[in-house]
Image: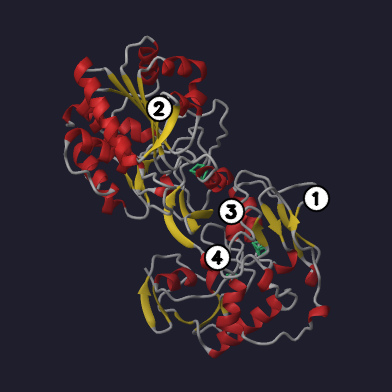
Amino acid sequence: MPTVEIDGRKIEVPDGTTVMQAAERLAIEIPHYCWHPGLSIAGNCRMCLVDIEKSPKLQIACNTRVTEGMVVSTTSEKTRVAQKAVLELLLLNHPIDCPICDQAGECKLQEYYMDYDRQRSRIDLPDKVRKKKAKAIGPLVMLDQERCVLCSRCVRFCDEITHTSELGFYSRGNHTELDVAPGRTLDNPYSGNVVDVCPVGALTSRDFRFQARVWYLDRFDSVCGACANGCNIHVYQREDRIYRFQPRENQAVNQFWMCDAGRLSYHGLQGEGRLAQAFWRTDGGFETASLPSAVRVVAGKLQDLAKAHGAGAVGILASAQSPNEELYLLRRLAARLSARLAGISWSPPDAFHDDFLIKADKNPNTKGLALQGIATNGAADELLRAAADGGLQALVLHRCDLTAWKGDAARSALERVPYLVVLDTDRRETAQFASVVLPIGTYVESDGTFTNHAGRVQRFLRAVAPPGEALPGWQVLAQLIAAVTAETPVESAAAVFDALAAEAPAFRGLSWDMLGEGGQAAGTAVDSPSATLA
Ligand code: SF4
Ligand code: SF4
Ligand code: FES
């Protein structure tokens, strides 16, 4: 464990630590372009040069290992001269089109110019080497060769992470340019990550570019809900509209990356078909209703039917799209109504998956269903058969696109249900069969947790407000239970999770606060806890 001194501050670090990593631990910034913690060390940009005592020449911090007693300066006169010189070289042929560049506001050329350079160009604009601008190199990625600082992060991503090697450098000297290999396009399932790793505006997202200036966006921690992997993400929003998803580092789940399908999945969360109001069926069709009154009516009707027809008269179907908190509250509701509860986890039969991040299970919480002891799929089929045979007086569908998943079997079952309650985010065919429709938020409109395929319980935070009168799913269910039990509704998703952790063996020992930013592994003990719920 060598001790190193950087800018007068000492730190002991494990053997093999680089000067860059040691400085990061001390929160000392060493400017860099080519170094990225998820990629091999290239050492080609020279932006990270530092002054090391006893070394006659400046050394690159990204590829110099700390040795016992090493003394480093990141601010010496020699270092400052080098930083300025490197930036001048990188900017020599740069087009300086910041006002029209989509990277403005999060560009390392802009930031480092202001922090380390601030000198005028010694080359006039017309004399600069011109390269291709706005070249679409794949479905998600736009290339501007003039802005590239040749750091090779994107090349290494395609070589080392996806092993697809679409990108490379071509020509020599001032004319060196980043491009796709002849005849190739950048269309691997993880292509959007090259935009994230590019430190400048050379690679931008065709989905996000020119949609919003980044300084207008607010960022929230979340978890991708598009498959069972549960990649950690940042949600960027402005005025309750989501503009982009970007990966958030979690070494236990997705390292630094996410897939393109997950990255684009935010579009599906804010489509035209969102439910913003409650509806109930009348003789003349559907009428809008206020959410609180619809919840009261549903609670009263379910209670009456359960009382009149006994245990099993009400069925509840919960999908693996539901967060843990909603599943817990559905279990409580089922216990109160002596209802039959089943889970459903549906994915397209030919869903794409690989052995890296992308899972065939396109639900974020199939594991959560299992860990709460909710029998899934076979039990859902049984429930639908009971409905089709006229054996159910009422059915509650929670986040179930049932007709899309089960086709005519669902249609004929739903037609036979005397009282059908649909809790959903969007207008779907299933709602056509409903007696009452209650609008609920998507996961980005709610606090909550998902349990990923590996049993990791991960928190997501509300990034945007649900549309209209819709509320987070846990809140609608809490109000429904409160109307059934005449108790005060629980007030936060955190409180629901803590109640779940206190009750369900698989979640025991966890708490909302303990989950932190990176989540925690759930226990493996699984039993059926419904009997303990009241
Ligand atoms: S396009 Fe971006 S990531 Fe790729 S080499 Fe150029 S500056 Fe680096
Ligand atoms: S791998 Fe799954 S969880 Fe990760 S970004 Fe893609 S869809 Fe989302
Ligand atoms: S970051 Fe060290 S040489 Fe590029």
Question: In the image shown, does 171 or 351 lie closer to the viewer?
Answer: 351
10 Å crowding of disc 4: few (<14), some (14-19), many (20+): some
Residue to which mark 1 is pinned: 182
Three-letter code for the amino acid on which mark 2 is drawn: Arg
Beta carbon at label 1 within 8 Å of ligand 1: no
Three-letter code for the amino acid on which mark 4 is drawn: Val
Mark positioned earlier in the residue sequence (3 or 1): 1
Q: Is residue 415 above or below residue 254?
A: above
Q: What is the secondary structure assignment of the residue under circle 4? A: helix
Residue to which mark 3 is pinned: 193
Which residue reaches farthest front? 284
Q: Distance between the residues labelled 3 and 4?
A: 17 Å
Q: Nearer the viewer, mark 3 or mark 1?
A: 3
The tag on residue 281 is 2
Q: What is the secondary structure assignment of the residue under circle 2? A: strand
Q: Distance between the residues labelled 1 and 4?
A: 33 Å
> Whole-percent x and y of residue 183?
80, 47
Q: Does residue 442 appear in the picture of this structure? A: yes
Where, by quadrant of the figure, is residue 387 drawn? Answer: top left
* Residue at x-position 42% and y-position 19%: 414
Image quarter hosting the C terminus: top left
Residue to which mark 4 is pinned: 214
- Ligand 1 - quadrant of the structure image: bottom right
> Whole-percent x and y of residue 351?
56, 31
